[in-house]
């Protein structure tokens, strides 16, 4: 299973949508690495994903964990301190997820001046230091973002470039508190959906012209299910195969909802990894939804906090999922033709290899 390890709640940025994240105490790890090791050793195939705050603010703890616990390692970072990771540890990472929102102006507007350039310098450096794993650009998409332009920007960067691009909608705009402060939402959703359609057209064209399946994570993950006719659970895996170990050792089903009672389902002291699945699940309206088996429910946090959403918040979010799934379904015949002709392989859509912290459905 996959465990997010919150190394600290401190962050060296104050991005528009996060403002430094959860303020609840404790902000620093209170359990011993031995306690963590004891818990993780009960899982035969653990994946540890360092998370924060900004996990690279606690490099010594990170190194200690990597030295002490046998696991596959992933990190989700804002990228500013990647230059401080020694080559020995870099090479041990299966995947590095870097938060970046697209072009320089878009990224710097949300994250701070100069952030884009520092990320670019650092991803170049880690490649020079022989990090050979999966480098994922993780975008936060705020209202008004040109999704086509910014995904294309990240996807087509070269030396340094990213292997995959993933994004999440900044759903703060769907919360009740924002209802009267964010005008023009429906126009922005139309523009987002239209950008998704354009991206899918480009994605398929690229397959036809180059035989390459470009690493657009939401498309690849959903298309994989459609091609193989498989049902999906909640795709981020929260409460299924994906948990977050909080600084005090309690375990949350989701890394974002750590301060909500529904999400806190155990602790490394009192529970076994095998006792965690099924303790927090999505419910209605997802379980009765006609595309539940493809969508998986999108987000446990939103599903269990519907009372906090703005009026019609759920249908508004779902309209983006429905559009994505519909457009990908329509692309299936073209993609199947390319597979049958040997231009691409069905296995090109086998991503991610394991739950790497990409939620698949934005
Ligand atoms: S489309 Fe909406 S209602 Fe349907 S499963 Fe997904 S999140 Fe749930
Ligand atoms: S998609 Fe929702 S439930 Fe899943 S990790 Fe993200 S915030 Fe948590």
Image (tube, rainbow, N blue to C red):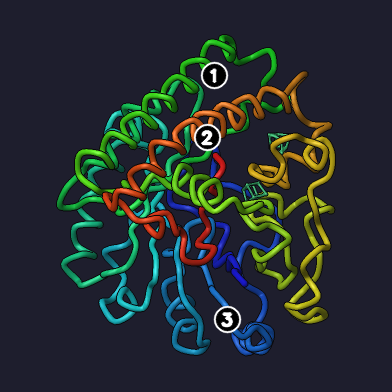
Viewer can see residue 119: no
Q: Can residue 185 be seen in this view?
A: yes
**First-in-chain label (3 vs 1):** 3
Whole-angstrom CA distance, mark 3 to mark 2, is 33 Å
- Choose the circle earlier in sequence order: 2 or 1: 1
The residues bearing labels 2 and 1 have C-alpha atoms spaced at a distance of 20 Å
Q: Taking 204 as reference, is 313 above or below it?
A: above
Q: How crowded is mark 2: few (under 14 residues within 10 Å), some or many (20 or more)?
A: some
Give whichever of discs 3 and 2 has the lower sequence position: 3
Q: In front here: 140 or 331?
A: 331
Mark 1 surroundings: few (<14), some (14-19) or many (≥20) residues within 10 A: some
Q: Which of marks 3 and 2 is in front?
A: 2
Residue 89 placement: quadrant = bottom left
Q: What element carries label 3?
A: loop
Q: In which quarter of the image is the N terminus?
A: bottom right
In the image shown, does 87 or 153 lie closer to the viewer?
Answer: 153
Q: Mark 1 points at which residue?
A: 189
- Give the secondary structure at mark 2: helix
Report which quarter residue 139 is drawn in.
top left
- Nearer to us of marks 2 and 1 is 2
Q: Residue at x 47, y 32 (%)?
A: 141
Give the alpha-carbon distance from disc 3 to disc 1, as whole Å: 39 Å
Residue shown at 54% from the left, 53% from the top: 228
Q: In this figure, which residue is indicated by the disc labeled 3?
A: 45
51 or 159, which lies in front? 159
Q: Give residue 243's position: percent from left, percent from top.
A: 67, 65
The answer to whether the beta carbon of the residue marked 3 is less than 8 Å from any atom of ligand 2 is no
Determine whether, in the image, residue 232 is placed left or right of residue 342.
right
Q: Dot 2 corresponds to which residue?
A: 329
Residue name at image x 77 percent, y 67 percent: 277
């Amino acid at each position: 299973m996959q465990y997010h390890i919150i190394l600290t709640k401190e962050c060296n940025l104050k991005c528009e949508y996060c403002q430094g994240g959860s303020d609840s105490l404790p902000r620093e790890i209170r359990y011993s690495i031995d306690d963590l090791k004891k818990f993780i050793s009960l899982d035969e195939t653990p994946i540890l994903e360092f998370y924060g705050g900004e996990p690279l603010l606690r490099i010594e703890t990170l190194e200690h964990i990597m030295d002490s616990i046998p696991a596959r390692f992933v990190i989700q970072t804002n990228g500013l301190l990647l230059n401080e990771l020694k080559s020995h540890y870099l090479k041990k990472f299966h995947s590095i997820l870097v938060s970046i929102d697209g072009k320089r102006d878009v990224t710097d507007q949300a994250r701070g001046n100069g952030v884009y350039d520092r990320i670019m310098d650092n991803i170049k450096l880690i490649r020079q230091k022989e990090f050979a794993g999966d480098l994922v650009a993780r975008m936060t998409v705020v209202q008004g973002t040109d999704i086509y332009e910014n995904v294309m920007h990240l996807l087509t960067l070269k030396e340094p470039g990213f292997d995959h691009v993933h994004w999440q909608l900044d759903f703060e705009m769907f919360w009740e508190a924002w209802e009267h402060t964010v005008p023009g939402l429906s126009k922005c959703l139309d523009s987002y959906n239209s950008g998704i359609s354009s991206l899918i057209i480009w994605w398929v064209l690229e397959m036809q012209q180059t035989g390459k399946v470009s690493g657009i994570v939401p498309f690849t993950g959903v298309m994989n299910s459609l091609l193989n006719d498989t049902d999906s659970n909640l795709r981020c895996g929260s409460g299924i195969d994906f948990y977050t170990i909080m600084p005090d050792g309690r375990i949350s089903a989701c890394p974002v909802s750590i301060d909500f009672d529904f999400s806190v389902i155990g602790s490394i002291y009192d529970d076994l990894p095998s006792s965690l699945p099924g303790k927090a699940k999505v419910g209605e309206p997802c379980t009765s939804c006609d595309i539940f088996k493809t969508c998986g429910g999108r987000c446990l946090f939103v599903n269990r906090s519907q009372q906090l959403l703005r009026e019609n918040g759920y249908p508004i979010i779902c309209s983006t999922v429905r559009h994505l799934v519909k457009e990908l379904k329509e692309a299936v015949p073209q993609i199947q033709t390319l597979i049958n002709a040997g231009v691409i392989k069905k296995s090109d859509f086998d991503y991610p290899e394991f739950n790497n912290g990409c939620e698949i459905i934005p």
